[in-house]
């Protein structure tokens, strides 16, 4: 199950997985990454997901 975030994997999602990221408030980004924000599971964009992972491992 590779490429879950690109190609046909996102085509069946709402607006191809694009929307507004709840963390950085950018619009039109792919919001495909499940992260835990303030105790709640939320979908965030790719850079936010990377930042959250960095914070978690630090
Ligand atoms: Zn974001």
Image: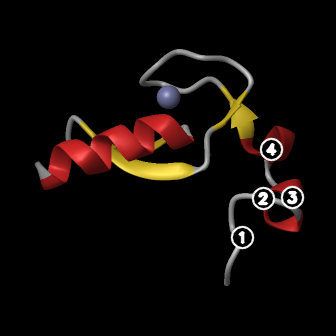
The residue wearing badge 2 is 6
How far apart are labels 2 and 1 at the CA level? 5 Å
- The CA distance from mark 1 to mark 4 is 17 Å
The outermost residue toward the left is: 58
The disc placed on residue 34 is: none
Whole-Å distance between the Cαs marked 1 and 3? 14 Å
Q: Which residue is mark 4?
A: 14
Whichever of labels 2 and 4 marks the residue nearer the N terminus, that label is: 2
- Report whether 40 appears left or right of 6: left
Q: Is residue 42 visible?
A: no
- Secondary structure at numbered mark 1: loop
Image mark for residue 12? 3
Q: Are marks 2 and 3 in contact (CB under 8 Å)?
A: no
Contact, mark 1 vs mark 4 (Cβ under 8 Å): no
Q: Which residue is mark 1?
A: 3
Q: In what element is the residue under mark 2?
A: loop
Relative to 46, is 33 above or below? below
Q: Earlier in the sequence, mark 2 or mark 3?
A: 2
Q: Disc 3 versus disc 4: distance between alpha carbons?
A: 7 Å
Residue that appears at 86% across and 58% down: 12
Q: Picture coordinates of residue 36 (x, y %)?
A: 30, 47
């Amino acid at each position: 199950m590779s490429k879950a975030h690109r190609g046909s994997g996102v085509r069946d999602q709402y607006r191809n997985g694009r929307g507004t990221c709840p963390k950085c408030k950018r619009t039109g980004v792919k919001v495909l990454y499940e992260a835990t924000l303030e105790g709640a599971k939320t979908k965030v964009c790719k850079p936010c997901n990377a930042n959250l992972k960095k914070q978690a491992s630090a």
